[in-house]
Image (cartoon, rainbow, N blue to C red):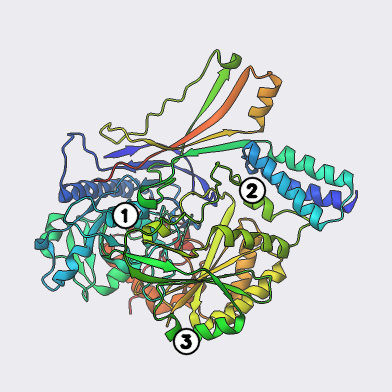
Amino acid sequence: MIRKNGPQRWKNIHVTIDQPLEDLIDIDNSNLQGIKLDTFGILNQTSKDINDLIQGAKSSKKQLKAIGSGWALSKIHVTDHYLLNTKLLNKCFEIDDQFFHQDFAEDKRKYIVIAQCGISIAELNIYLELPKVANQVPRSLKTAGIGAGQTIVGAVSGNTHGAAINFGAIPDFVVGIQLCNGTDQPIWIERSTYPVLNQNFVDGIQSKLIRNDDDFNAALISFGTFGVITAFAIETEPIYQITYPTIFQINHTKLSSIFQDSNYYSGLHHLEFIFDPHTQDGYHMIEGTKVKYEDGHPIPTPVWIITSRKGYAPGDWTTKFLLNLPFVSAAYKSKVQYKEYLKRSVLSNVRGTSGQLFTATITYLEGYNETAFAVSIQDAIKTIEIIKQETKNAKLPLVIQARAVGPGNAIFGFTNHLPRSVVFEFGIVYDKNYPIFEEKLISRLVASNIKYTLHWSKNALINPKRMKEMYGESNIQKWKSSRYKLFEHDMDLIRVFDNAPLILAGLESPPIVV
Amino acid sequence: MHTTTKLILAYNLEIKPSFAYQSSHQVVSKVLFSIYLVRQRVQINFQHFALLLLIIFSAQSCTTVHVYQTGGPGGREMGNAPSTEWKSDVSNTFLYGAIRDDVPIENCALGDGTRINIEEIKIEKNIWRIGLYIVTLGLWDSSKISWRCAKPCNP
Ligand SMILES: Cc1cc2nc3c(=O)[nH]c(=O)nc-3n(C[C@H](O)[C@H](O)[C@H](O)COP(=O)(O)OP(=O)(O)OC[C@H]3O[C@@H](n4cnc5c(N)ncnc54)[C@H](O)[C@@H]3O)c2cc1C
């Protein structure tokens, strides 16, 4: 059912956005008749409600945007008009054998689930790892970011990644997309090269089927601009654990040799390193290996939790305040931050499932931004040198976290560099220095001929020139063509899903027809 | 004006009013940390140091407390995973609690009326509310209460 909450101000979690809305709309799985619906019933009720909302927005010439948990730090989830809260759509469903495509291997079927858009990663972990049905095998997500509070569609749409060096990012385990975009029926999209569900399933969810690699790869990372994604089919795997030895420190030379040696990382599940850019040398390595699930290991203590056992935590604005403290050098602040980071935010000497290890949820760091960009692992060393120089020049207090990710297929996947991406990420005070620093870094990368891509949900500085540098003209055209095609070239509908960042990136305009 | 003072003032002028949502223990920890950092790194005379502390206090004397659930099955932390966005109301208590002003929460329910839980609550006092409390000798105690609802149960 739909509930309209009326005009109000809306803030994202880190309050990098605080703005008015014309309406905040909640949607949930209940119905007035109080009937318990089956899988198809729930999915059909949702898609009908959403399609009606989209039609309403179209006729009143308003924009509509779906939000998940509001964790994105950039404005990709922003509109001044209607914001649709999807977090109450949090169901997960198994699929009967009769609904699988004949080519989809039988032994893989029990690892496919349908996740409604608003289910959080934490809820999914519990659903998969701790099944409540007797004959259901425990399963794991193939990868996760550090946090578990994002919704599945929000995480995919913003290209959330972890450090799965030999897999990819969260979008890379999606195998089916249900999209509501205001056209006559919802759309079920799969890759033509990887059919999973059959026409009976598509009929059951009253959708039209599109099997096309380009459309799938475009819709996957589309930050709410293709319509509202109501559900995904995701591919999971048998439950596993990841084991992390005690973190260890290496020098620049050793790090450089690791990046050149694919044998070093071919057996790893997780490769991450952190460093203080104000120090000359020294990198802490966080390496995880996938192992068979075994009962009896101690439950990992959550990391990335800044609240003490007694509830003491830095206030909402403390980080910003401390990092702006006058008279204290940036190098010293970085040193203090780095020490704290090592204490609280690294997986060291621990073994657990994905759901037990990647649990960051409690974070009120208002006024604190995170920014991230990716380069090829082959350019990582040069990039580190640039980051160090620029951080020192800008006198910024930073800790850099870097995670390696395997390439995926989404057209706008920012983690698709070959042979692997290294995503550099840092928390930074959200003030006027942030764009200046980011601008400087990007210009240094360009000047050094380093191909870079910016994280969709963390970086605001995406413009048409950058889009071209990052993805190339032909990918941009491919993405736009799919967007226009899926909207059946209905300009009024397309405008419903335009928003400021899309226009800033030059992605709202029609594709060039060759 | 002495350069240090100018620096402090310039810095303070940049602080926005909303900067200051802190709980008292957070303010104290912040100040202690500032003292620690400043004393370690800077040669600063006593008046300027006192001025710095005064400015920090005046800019920070507002409070926020978050109340939320934590934990989850088998170490799968579910903390702070609400299903709705923030909703707020102001609660005014008069005459030391003789007249209270409750905050009934009506939106933590699905469209069909099924109730869902409250996931988190935030209690804020800004500088004006604290001022009001002091000026009225506690007769008027005003807070902003915000909340978000929990997720519906998954099968
Ligand atoms: C504490 C914290 C930890 C984080 N850790 C990581 C990390 O480890 N790795 C990483 O890469 N990122 C990380 N992030 C960033 C975060 O994962 C991304 O911002 C993610 O996109 C947020 O998902 P969300 O559910 O909050 O979606 P939102 O932020 O609400 O939305 C993100 C995008 O998804 C779209 N969207 C949401 N739902 C739908 C829908 N149903 N249909 C269509 N579009 C939709 C929105 O319109 C928007 O464009 C972190 C952020 C925080 C605050």
Question: Which label was assigned to residue A261?
Answer: 3
Ranked by sequence position, the earlier of labels 3 and 1 is: 1
SS for dot 1: helix
Find the distance from the CA under tag 3 to the CA under tag 1: 35 Å
- The residue positioned 45% from the left and 83% from the top of the image is A264
SS for dot 3: loop
Question: Which label was assigned to residue A318?
Answer: 2
**In the figure, A383 relative to A463: above or below?**
below
- Comparing A244 with B4, the one in front is A244
The residue carrying mark 1 is A124
- Compared across the picture, whether A487 is left or right of A415 comes to left
- Compared across the picture, whether A141 is left or right of A437 comes to left
Ranked by sequence position, the earlier of labels 3 and 2 is: 3
Q: Quadrant of residue A419?
A: bottom left
Q: Chain of mark 1?
A: A
- Compared across the picture, whether A19 is left or right of A81 comes to right
Q: Chain of mark 2?
A: A
Residue A44 placed where, x, y %? 19, 49
Task: Residue type at mark 3: give it.
Answer: Asp
Question: Which label was assigned to residue A417?
Answer: none
Ranked by sequence position, the earlier of labels 1 and 2 is: 1
Residue A340 visible to the viewer: yes
- Compared across the picture, whether A60 is left or right of A192 comes to right
Residue B10 placed where, x, y %? 78, 50
SS for dot 2: helix
**In the figure, A482 relative to B59: above or below?**
below
- The residue positioned 17% from the left and 61% from the top of the image is A208
Find the distance from the CA under tag 1 to the CA under tag 2: 32 Å
Task: Residue type at mark 2: give it.
Answer: Thr
Residue A77 placed where, x, y %? 43, 54
